[in-house]
Image (cartoon, rainbow, N blue to C red):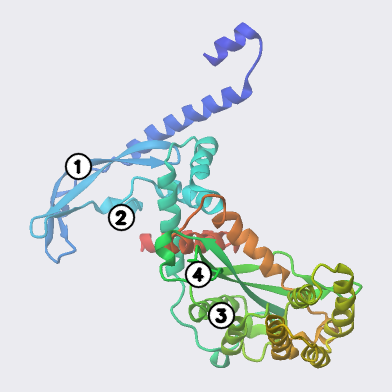
Amino acid sequence: MIFRDQRRTGRLDLEAVEMAVRSACHRAGAAALTEFLRFPAPTAEQRTLACRCGRKAHYRELRTKPVLTAVGPVAVSRPYYWCPDCHTGQSPADVELDIENTEFSPGVRRMQALVGQEAPFDQGREQMKVLADLEVTAKAVERAAEGIGAAIAQREPAEIPPALDLPAAAGEPIPILYVQMDGTGVPVVKKETLGRQGKVAGQPAHTREVKLGCVFTQTKWDQEGYPIRAPDSTTYTGAVETAEEFGPRLYREACHRGWSRALLRVVMGDGAEWIWNLAALHFPGAIEIVDLYHARQHLWDLARRLYPNDEGKQKAWMKRHQKRLLDKGKIEKLVGLLRAIPSRNSELAEKIRTEADYFARNAERMRYPQFRRRHLFVGSGVIEAGCKTVVASRLKRSGMFWTVRGANAILALRCACLNGRFEDYWEDRRTAIAA
């Protein structure tokens, strides 16, 4: 039909031709694959095999199973065995082919996982159709992506020895290794927030917090002394979980990246207490730095409370407290000035005390001139960007509401892809099946 239209109109629609050729190649490939997957009936010695119940399963017949492959639908004809004791059937070929309990081939599930971690599941379905000429449902993409993500999450070791007990790993020394962490909320279904207090007093929570960590290296700085992050050195890990659960997760990632080989180790974050509790527990001895821009924001918040609707006085106050004290690491003097601010307003007085305590508590983490002299980062922009690229761009789109299990599965899958470890998982899976 395409070539007849070409002769009639004198115009070649190359896209239509190439899509037609692709479909024809897929049909031919599916036919060939169907023949290849036509297993013979077992010999007399192969007509019984061990059942999971401990008894014997007996061969019944060759059964056909439809499977969607990378070249389209095929029919797999393989021996089927039945156990008369536990009344369950099995097809060993399904395990060998990695199609047990699924109608999608490994190649198709791999595609579904990749598109599912990148975009909403319905968009993934559309990508499968446009890019691979495969018809799947959004639910199929969701199940495959979340299933593989959950499997990736389960591969992590249960426990790693503390830093002080960790032997030095083999390999080249790492000049500077950074660990950063932060939290960001993701929308969840109502059952995941039962009994949880929202950000507004008296209102229920609508989100759960993803704790995200990143690890990256630095080997040099520019002519002005500002640090330069090593290209493609950032890896991520994260989940919706408590700080106690997240700490070992981030420590595992740091160990994987060579924490024991780092000549200089740095932990960065905002002023959240859970961050520095984890730093003390899992990364003792590291240089700790509070994000400079987060510290400045604390001062700006106070300036707006001190001089509401007076931008000029806010800027003058900030120049005196930020540029002359905070940026120069004179935290004790800054704390003294804050505590000396008079206020008859109880709410404002409480705000002043809270901010003064914040700076006093983090004084050693705010020696910014010292950090700059050592050519270290003083801003946690890498993890803040990670909260957007790793979490928000996939899990915080309009109309999305997640279960914790689903969100964690996609996060594990997404981190594996961004870290360049998805292929490692797939190779390990293939090796395990072949063993």
Along the line of sight, which residue is nearer the eye, 363 or 258? 363
- Tell me the distance, in whole angstroms, between the alpha carbons under discs 2 and 3: 35 Å
Q: Amino acid type of disc 1?
A: Leu
- Tell me the distance, in whole angstroms, between the alpha carbons under discs 2 and 4: 53 Å
Sequence order check, earlier mark of 2 and 4: 2
Sequence order check, earlier mark of 1 and 4: 1
- Tell me the distance, in whole angstroms, between the alpha carbons under discs 3 and 1: 51 Å
Along the line of sight, which residue is nearer the eye, 207 or 289? 207
Return the x and y of residue 395 as percentages of the image width and height. 54, 57
The quarter in which the C terminus is drawn is: bottom left
Q: Amino acid type of disc 3?
A: Tyr
Return the x and y of residue 426 as percentages of the image width and height. 47, 59
Q: Secondary structure at mark 4?
A: loop
Q: Quadrant of residue 137?
A: top left
Side of 378 where 58 appears, left or right:
left
The disc placed on residue 202 is 4
Q: Would you call the spot at circle 3 few (<14 residues within 10 Å), some (14-19), or many (20 or more)? A: many
Q: Amino acid type of disc 2?
A: Val
**On screen, residue 202 above or below 422:** below
**On screen, residue 110 above or below 152:** above
The disc placed on residue 251 is 3
The residue mark sitting in front, 2 or 4, is 4
Q: Disc 2 designates what residue?
A: 95
- Tell me the distance, in whole angstroms, between the alpha carbons under discs 4 and 3: 36 Å
